[in-house]
Amino acid sequence: MKSAQNLWHESLRIEYTPSRPWFVAHTKARHEKKLSDCLTHKGITNYLPLAVNISRTGGRTRFYESPLFSGYLFVSSEAGRCEEVFDTHCVANLIPVFDQTKLVSELLGVQSALRNLAHVEPYHHVRSGLKARFVRGPMTGMEAMVVSRKREYRVLLNVEVIRRSICVECDLDDIEIVDNNG
């Protein structure tokens, strides 16, 4: 069960516009959703990837959402509106993004995984490993890193600017191994 906030973030058009560059808001502890709501209310484009979690206690099943990248929110705005982000009192720091194209590509991968794959979870950042490319399905063309090969392959999508990753499960038929040098 996804909230309206999560559905809005999944439908957000993530793109790079020179007049509205992306940067990363490092939030105060547990302020990601509040910051996203404040910025949305101010008309500032932001992206907060949320994972749907399940909690079972006392015979009840509860669904809740939590940020995939705890402590971070991605913001696209004119440079003059950065002060408005700080005015929310939810931000510890703003991190500039020097490679806008790479960040947009990584965020599109995260968004596609959340929209189309059943199981997505946070994972520690990995810098090297066996590279794979999706050859079938909704993530065709995206590259990832293989971290596990049990019944289904588990691959990582990295977001380098914040040194975080998400882990997604996929079928072996959906990926091909790519030469690490190419």
Image: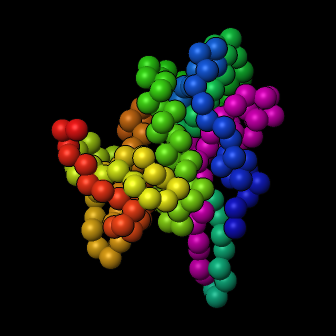
Among all residues in the image, which is located at the extreme top?
80
Foreground residue, 103 or 35?
103
Left or right: residue 96 versus residue 53 is: left
* Residue 14 location (% of width, % of height): 61, 35
The answer, for residue 91, to whether it is visible in the render is no
Question: Any magenta on residue 49?
Answer: yes
Q: Which quadrant does the N terminus fall into?
A: bottom right
* Residue 137 location (% of width, % of height): 49, 59
Among the 4 quarters of the image, the one containing residue 46: top right
* Residue for point 73% across, 58% down: 3
Among the 4 quarters of the image, the one containing residue 91: top right
* Residue for point 67% across, 83% down: 60
Question: Any magenta on residue 41?
Answer: yes
Foreground residue, 30 or 138?
138
Q: Which quadrant does the C terminus fall into?
A: top left
* Residue 7 location (% of width, % of height): 71, 53
* Residue 84 location (% of width, % of height): 72, 21
Foreground residue, 78 or 14?
14
Left or right: residue 88 versus residue 141 is: right
Q: Is residue 141 above or below residue 167?
A: above
Q: Tell me which segment is drawn in magenta.
A: 29-57
Among all residues in the image, which is located at the extreme front?
135
* Residue for point 81% across, 34% down: 41
Among all residues in the image, which is located at the extreme bottom?
59
Left or right: residue 178 versus residue 68 is: left
* Residue for point 64% across, 88% down: 59
The answer, for residue 29, to whether it is visible in the render is yes
Q: What is the number of callouts on the image?
A: 0
